[in-house]
Image (cartoon, rainbow, N blue to C red):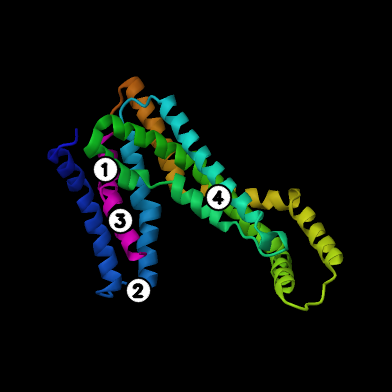
Amino acid sequence: MIGWGDVYRVVAAMAPLYFALGLGYGSVRWWKLFTPDQCEAVNRLVIYFAFPFFGFDFTARAGPFGASYRVLAADAIAKLAVLLAIAGCAAFKAATPRTRRGGRATYSWCITGFSLAALNNALLVGVPLLDAMYGKWARDIIVQLSVLQAVVWFPLMLVVFEARQGWLEMTPSAEVFALEEGDLAETPGSVDVDRPAAAGGDGRKKTAATGWTFWAPLLGNVGLKIVRNPNVYASILGVAWSSMANRWHLEMPSIVDGSIAIMSKTGIGMGMFSMGTHA
């Protein structure tokens, strides 16, 4: 049974986060202390310094890093369930009368829906929340899921985003033609267009767009973004150090530990503040 003490611990863990979030929001919306360019600079500080150091520091101190395969399997099943639900919605939308007549069908909402439902900011919000609710073992689970998310799911999402952008750039006439055709189909007395010719040309462009000339630069671009993402390195290095330190009983030099800690302590506060400036 949940007691008032448990409720207080959760509130005490979450209140500082929303305090920093509120300061960020108020500094932009109410007090006009930061311009959009300055907010972007704060966001870059979080992305390239504060949050990677926080992620590395937290992962490196996580203790013995033994992966819980039940937790990882549960995470994979949950994401699969989200994918199936989104695929069902997309199939239903594709079968609607307007889409079947040639109306425009966009599926960008599928990417957004999966991101919101399955990819969460576990380290930033989940750590203080689950730590207050369940303790250290919950923190270890958060570390495992966060590392998996950083090295597996985020790169996969980058592939999806780049594929969508590349498809729109290489086949811009496809959606224009679909929109125009759908509008003509719904206009009384409209003259039929030369659909076979247009569809044939558009089909050739799609066949060309789905070949190696489409995927090679796309994957190269994704690879460059992953290489430039410091959070990926932070997760991998944190796990590597945690494993070696617990295997051979190593201790991080105090100079290195202090340098990492001073940046790590800004991670949660600056992250929530930056989220507030973009709210």
Say which residue appears at 28% left-offset and 64% top-offset.
24
| 31 or 197, nearer to the observer | 197
Contact? badges 4 and 3 (CB < 8 Å)? no
Contact? badges 2 and 1 (CB < 8 Å)? no
Q: Is residue 262 above or below residue 188?
A: above
Q: Position of residue 104 (x, y in %)?
A: 66, 64
Left or right relative to 65: residue 133: left
Question: Which segment is the magenta one?
Answer: 253-279
Measure the C-alpha gap from mark 4 to mark 1.
28 Å
Instruction: List the residue tagged with mark 2.
Output: 35
**Residue that extends furthest to the front in the rendered view of this protein:** 188
* Quadrant assignment, res 169: bottom right
| Amino acid residing under circle 3 | Met
| 105 or 245, nearer to the observer | 105
| Amino acid residing under circle 2 | Thr
Q: Quadrant of the C terminus?
A: bottom left
> Which comes sooner in the sequence, label 3 or label 1?
1
Contact? badges 4 and 1 (CB < 8 Å)? no
Say which residue appears at 30% left-offset and 33% top-offset.
138
Q: Position of residue 194 (x, y in %)?
A: 85, 70
Measure the C-alpha gap from mark 4 to mark 2.
29 Å
> Which comes sooner in the sequence, label 4 or label 1?
1
Q: Is residue 204 above or below residue 240?
A: below
Instruction: List the residue tagged with mark 1.
Output: 129
Say which residue appears at 26% left-offset and 31% top-offset.
136
Instruction: List the residue tagged with mark 3.
Output: 272
> Which comes sooner in the sequence, label 2 or label 3?
2
